[in-house]
Amino acid sequence: WRAAGSSAACPNTNFLKGLKWSPDGACLLTASDDNWLRLYDLPQDAAAGASTSGSSCSAAGGAGPDNLAPALRMHAGETVYDYCWYSRMSALDPVSCCLASTARGHPIQLWDACSGEPRATYRGYNDADEPTAAYSMAFSPDGGRLLGGYNRSIYVFDVTRPGRDYKRIVTHKRKNPESITGIVSCMAWSPAGDVFAAGTYTGGLGVYDGRTYELLLLLSGTKGGLTQLLFSADGNYLYTGARQDPHMLCWDVRHTYAALYSMERPTAHTNQRVQFDIEPAGRHLLTGGCDGAVLVYDLSSGQLVDRRQVAADTVNGVGFHPTLGLLATASGERGHNVLGHVRAA
């Protein structure tokens, strides 16, 4: 399937900026350069198509080239910095159907994924008591806490208490080498929720205790600004990707301060967030890149095992469906007079 907005809503300068499946796999969320969040329902024939002998989704049921229309659209107001699903989201429980977004000059917004209406806001303030926007977010696995990444700080919000009530974790202190400097650009919880990792645009990477918020591990070796972190299913390994850096790194967070191995991708000359994802079985990692291809790496060795050309420009989003054999990709970049598109295959 391919999804694209209408020409009136999405001018030719528009392009997608990643994608994320909902935790239950019922729908797909995208952000675009036009500052809109778009939610797409999973097509009814997707399960049947995924269970067949691997036929192309673009041909399933005689579908046309642009056959998916967004079920909901939510305007973020300004440039979208980050967006994420509520970690306990299930279509069977309408109360849990929500997502969060953060945009330039705006507080963290909690959206209702059934109506597209705002539910609540979580507001962070800087040292001058001025409202400031979060650059990254991450819900805890139990759904009780929402982390917001700010300049030299992480704010911990109680999901049930919107507003400006939060706990501040200072990630960088002057004259303290045991800290990570700069804007907290990405975060990720371990599946067990006992630790979380935070990365910055200066390349700082730290692992924190999920209960006391103390820094447990400081990792160095990233050359570019970190844009994505992802734990393995068992929580023992951490995978990192950065902008202006062609190397994705694998870390064993149990007993090492150096990366185990690196995986290359063509992202050395871009500031875009280029996503990667791990298949549900945990054996392979897929990543996009600036050459329009999806690369497949074996996580047991870090070796490249496959490469598929899926777009004519930068593939900035990849995501595995949590239960079905579907992979979604998003592509696009500024400067090309074409629409971005999201494709599931």
Image (cartoon, rainbow, N blue to C red):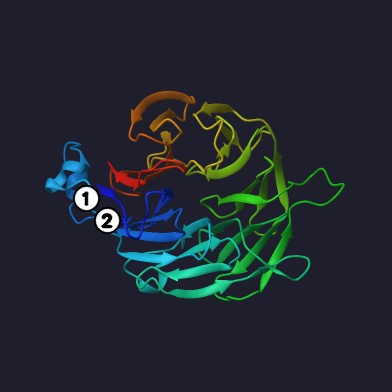
Q: Secondary structure at mark 2?
A: loop
Q: Residue 42: percent from the left, percent from the top?
A: 27, 56
Residue shown at 54% from the left, 59% from the top? 140
Q: Characterize the local packing of mark 2: few (<14), some (14-19) or many (20 or more) Cα atoms within 10 angstroms.
A: some
Residue shown at 52% from the left, 32% from the top? 267
Residue shown at 75% from the left, 71% from the top? 129
Give residue 169's quadrant in the image. Answer: bottom right
Q: Amino acid at mark 1?
A: Ala
**Residue in front for this viewpoint, 17 or 200:** 17
Q: Secondary structure at mark 1?
A: helix
Residue occupied by mark 1: 46
Circle count? 2
Q: Residue 77: percent from the left, percent from the top?
A: 51, 66
Q: Residue 327: percent from the left, percent from the top?
A: 33, 42
- Judged left or right of residue 95, residue 148 is right
Residue occupied by mark 2: 42
Q: Is residue 208 above or below residue 165?
A: above
Q: Characterize the local packing of mark 1: few (<14), some (14-19) or many (20 or more) Cα atoms within 10 angstroms.
A: some
**Residue in front for this viewpoint, 45 or 83:** 83
Q: Amino acid at mark 2?
A: Leu
Farthest right residue? 175
Farthest left residue? 62
Do the CB atoms of the residues marked 2 and 1 lie less than 8 Å apart? yes
- Judged left or right of residue 138, residue 53 is left
- Which quarter of the rendering shows the C terminus? top left
Q: Is residue 204 above or below residue 105?
A: above
Give residue 223's quadrant in the image. Answer: top right
**Residue in front for this viewpoint, 294 or 131:** 131
Q: Residue 46: percent from the left, percent from the top?
A: 21, 50
- Judged left or right of residue 327, residue 1 is left
Residue shown at 55% from the left, 62% from the top? 102
C-alpha gap between disc 2 and disc 1? 7 Å
